[in-house]
Image (tube, grey):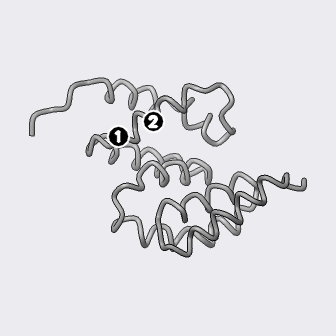
């Protein structure tokens, strides 16, 4: 199956953004490659993303999407849990996005996993005193 022109363009644009060394951009490239069925290419890019991730805390949402696209649901939920523990603003955006019925299959699998309902429940609980 040939990818549509806008999908190929999206991968190219994301790859150009990677030159900035941004975890979010790199995770986006991996996600796009995986969604296009280019799993070998996506897995080849994965180590570079994971090497940058600890240095860039704002990328948990992108890491969650990347792991979901790769089918690594356990890792996706770890990213969600870190997001919740740090009360990242992006987790609320993510919950809003995941209400869509038109999610790509990897993200729908994440949403349909029983752990996602538990995550949603925990998001709506008050933060515990530290």
| Residue under label 2 | 93
Q: Secondary structure at mark 1?
A: loop
Residue 25, located in which quarter of the rendered image? bottom right
Instruction: Choose between 121 and 22: the one closer to the eye.
Output: 22
Q: Secondary structure at mark 2?
A: helix
Residue 89's disc number: 1
Residue displayed at 31% across by 40% down: 84
Mark 1 vs mark 2, CA separation in Å: 7 Å
Identify the image quadrant of residue 88. Answer: top left
Q: Residue at x 57, y 29 (%)?
A: 112
Q: Position of residue 5 (x, y in %)?
A: 84, 55
Where does residue 81 sit, x and y in percent of width and height?
A: 35, 43
Tell me if 92 is positioned left or right of 2 in this view. left
93 in relation to 57, above or below: above
Q: Are marks 1 and 2 in contact (CB under 8 Å)?
A: yes
Hey, which residue is sitting farthest left in the picture? 130
Residue 97, above or below 53: above
Please name whichever residue, 28 or 16, is drawn nearer the observer in this view of the structure.
Answer: 16
Quadrant position of the C terminus in the picture: top left
């Amino acid at each position: 199956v040939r990818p549509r022109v806008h999908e190929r363009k999206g991968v190219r644009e994301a790859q150009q953004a990677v030159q900035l060394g941004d975890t979010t951009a790199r995770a986006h490239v991996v996600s796009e490659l995986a969604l296009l069925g280019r799993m070998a290419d996506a897995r080849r890019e994965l180590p570079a993303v994971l090497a940058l991730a600890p240095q860039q805390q704002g990328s948990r949402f992108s890491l969650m999407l990347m792991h979901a696209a790769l089918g690594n649901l356990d890792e996706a939920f770890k990213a969600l849990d870190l997001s919740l523990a740090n009360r990242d603003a992006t987790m609320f955006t993510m919950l809003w996005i995941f209400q869509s019925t038109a999610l790509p299959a990897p993200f729908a699998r994440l949403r349909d996993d029983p752990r996602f309902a538990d995550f949603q429940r925990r998001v709506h609980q008050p933060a515990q005193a530290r």
